[in-house]
Amino acid sequence: MRAAWGIYCLAPSASCAVPAAWVKPKRLPMCYGCAETVDTNSRAINVWVSLMKLGAKTGCHQRSDRSLFFRGCQFPVCARCTGLFAGQAAGIALFWWCARVDPLRAFLCAAGSAALLGLDGFLQLKGLLVSTNPRRLATGLLCGFFVTGFFIRSVALLLQIFGV
């Protein structure tokens, strides 16, 4: 049986490929700010519901206590995933800079930021430190940007080595 993958992301990262079978179907959280100000049959609510479903397909837990809100509506993914995706987008937007960075420096930045993200999650998991949404967002941004930059630099180096 062929596995269906629940996420397609811009660059490999810790949350990159999650089989759709691992993503438990769940009830969508209520968008209180939107629901109070907009008719529930409106286009805005339909777009929000579609984005929440897309966010669930990424493998994100979408916990409201770990998510950012805009005008009363929960983001489709948690703060850490928001940071990862925004960091990946920034890494791609600055690909011209990432392709010129020293390969060792790119690797060290990627490894350090991934370790920082993992440490934040591990300390929270063990109950030693309560992570906050700004910290989750910051570690996600750093990791997403530097890991994407490292992959861009690696591809640029391989293209240079093989003379393409």
Image (spheres, grey):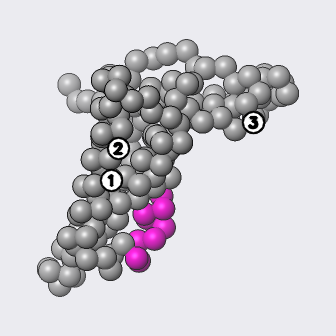
Q: Is residue 115 above or below residue 162?
A: above
Mark 3 lies on a secondary structure that is loop
Q: Tell me if mark 3 has few (under 14), some (14-19) or many (20+) residues whose alpha carbon lies within 10 angstroms of its own.
A: few
Does residue 63 appear in this view?
Answer: yes
Distance from Cα at disc 3 to Cα at disc 1: 30 Å
Residues at discs 1 and 2 in contact (Cβ within 8 Å) = yes
Residue type (three-letter) at the residue carrying disc 2 = Leu
What is the spatial separation of the Cα atoms under label 1 and label 2, in whole angstroms?
6 Å
Q: Residues within 10 Å of mark 2 (few under 14, many from 20)?
A: many
Q: Decide which of tag 2 and tag 3 comes sooner along the chain.
A: 3
Please, which residue is most extreme toward the front here? 128
The picture quadrant where one finds residue 50 is top right
Q: Tags 2 and 3 in contact by the CB under 8 Å rule? A: no
- Give the residue at mark 2: 117
> Does residue 38 appear to the left or right of 125 in the view shown?
right
Disc 3 target residue: 71
The local secondary structure at tag 1 comes to helix
Which residue, given by chain and number where applicable, does mark 1 sit on? 113
Prevailing secondary structure of the magenta residues: helix
Q: What is the C-alpha distance between the residues marked 2 and 3?
A: 28 Å
Which three-letter amino acid code belongs to the residue tagged 1?
Ser
